[in-house]
Image: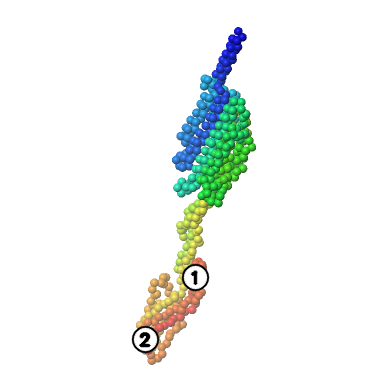
Amino acid sequence: MCRRLSVCFVVVVLISSVSSRTAHADPVKCLAGIGKNGAAFAQAKMKILQKCEEGRFKGKITTTCQGDQKTQDAITKAQSKTAAAIAKTCAGKDKTCGTGDDDSTAWDASTCQGFEAQGCTSAVTNCNDIGPCLTCIGEKAVDQAINVYYGGLQHSDPKTQKDLNKCQLAIGKSAAAFFAAKSKALQKCWDTVNKNAAKGESVEACPPFGLGDGKAVDAINKAASKKDATICKACGGKDKLCNTADDVITPADIGITGQCLPVTIPNGGTACGSITMATLQDIVNCIDCVTEFKADCIAIAAARGFPQDPGYPTECAAALPPTPTPTSTPVLSATATTTGVVTPTATQTVSGGGPTTTATQTAAGPTATVTATHTASAPTATATQTVSAPTTTATPAPGCPTRITFTGTSTGAVLDSGWTGAAGSATSSGPSTTSRPTPARSPTIAAPAIPASSARRPRIAAGRTVSPGAMTARLARPPRSARAGAASPRGHASTTSARTCRSPPVASRRASGTR
C-alpha cells in the first residue's frame, strides 16, 4: 500500500512539474531571445544606413537617408522582425503576449530605459512592448554613430581626388563594421552568461563591467585593431600608417574636425568629448570611443534581467551637452550701381580770354555701393572701378598772330611794304602788295593796327637794281606773357587771359634779285 502511495506521489509531482513548465515559456530562452534580437536590429540598421550614406557620398542617392524610401522600408521591416521574434520567444505556449503565460517577468511592469534623454521611455506591460523599446534605443544610438562617421564628410571627386575619396569611404565602412563586430561579441557574451548561470556555474558581467565569457574582450580588441588598420591604410600615405611624416590627408580635408561627441563609455570609461580631432589618429580614437559607447548601451539595455545585470548606466541615459550652433556673420560686399555724374568739359570760346568751363552730362562708370549681405563663405573680392578726375584740355586763346606773309614786286630803288598793320596795298611805286592769310589756321585774326609813321622802311643803296621778288614779313615771337593761356604742366587750363601785344611786330624782309 505504501509502495503504491509512493508511486502515486511521484506521478503527481511529475505532472505538476510538466504543467508548470507548459504554463510558462523558458525564461532563459526568453532572455536569450531578447538579447539576440535587440542586437540584431542595431546591427541591421547600421548596415542599412551605412549603405545609404555611402550611396549618397557616391552620388547614387540624391536625398537624405531619412527621405530615401528604400532605406526607410528596410528599417521598418527590421523593426517588425525584431518585435515579432521577441514576442514569439517570450509569449508562452499560446504565442500571445499578455495572456498570463509570458516569461518576460524581468521586463513586466516597468518602463523602457531611455537613451540620452531622447525618449524611449514608454511603459512595458508585456512582451509586446519589449521590441519597440529596444528598437527605439537602437535607432537613436545608430543614428548618432552614423552621423559621426558620415555627417561631416567633405565631398570629394572620385576621379580627381581619388586618395581622399578612398579615405573617406574607408572611415565610414570600417567604423560600421567595428560597431557590428562589437555588438555581436557583447550579445554572445551575455548569452553565454545567461546559459552558464542556468547551469549553476559562476558567471561574471560582460564588458565593460567584467570579463563575461572571457572571449568578448579579445574579439572586441581584434575588431578595433582591424578598424584602425583599415582607416590608416586608406588615409595614412604611402607607409599606410597614421601620424607619420608622409601623411597628406588632414582631418580638415576629410571633414571630421573639432571635438569628438561628448559621450562617456560606461563604468568609468573614456570621455570621448576630450578628444580633439587634429590628426588622423585622433579621428581613429574618436570613432573607436563613440562606437564603443553606442554598442555598450544597446547591449546593456537588452541584458535587463540577465544574471549579473549591472543595471542601466547613467552614462547611457544622461542628456548630451548642447552643441554650439554656427551663426552666420554679415559680410560686406561691394555691388556696382551705375549713376549719372556731371563731368566738367573745357570748351573754347573766342572772346579774347581763357577757356570757359561748361558742364556737360557724360555717362560715368559704375559707382561702388556697399551692401550688407549674409554669406556663409569668406568675403569675395570685387573689382571696383576708380573714376579719375576729368582732364581739361586748353586751346590757346586768341592773341597776337605768329606769322603774316606779304608778297610784292618793285622796280624802284626803294622797296617798301607800305604795311600799316591793316590789310592794304604797298606805298611803293610798284604794284600793290596784297596780304595773304596763313592757310589752315583757325580762327583767322587780323593783326593789331600800327601807325604809319612808325613803320620801318628798309633802304637799298643807290645804284643797285632789285628785280621783282617776294617779300616775307615775319612777326617776332610773342613775349612769354602773351602765352599765359597755354596749358599748365598738370593738364589744367590756366585762367589767365592772353595779353594784347604792346609793341608793333618786327617785320623782317627778304628781297631776292640781281644786285
Q: Is residue 514 above or below residue 205?
A: below
SS for tag 2? loop
- For image coordinates 48% across by 58% down, the residue present is 342
Q: Residue furthest top?
A: 1
Q: Is residue 375 above or below residue 488?
A: above
Task: Give the crowd class for mark 2: few <14, some 14-19, many >=20 residues within 10 Å.
Answer: few
Q: CA distance from mark 1 to mark 2?
A: 42 Å
Residue 388: x and y in percent read 50, 61
- For image coordinates 60% across by 8% down, the residue present is 1
Which residue in the structure is indicated by mark 1?
485
Residue 308: x and y in percent read 62, 29
Q: Which quarter shows the C terminus? A: bottom left
Residue 467: x and y in percent read 35, 86
Residue type, label 1: Gly
Which residue in the structure is indicated by mark 2?
513
Residue type, label 2: Gly
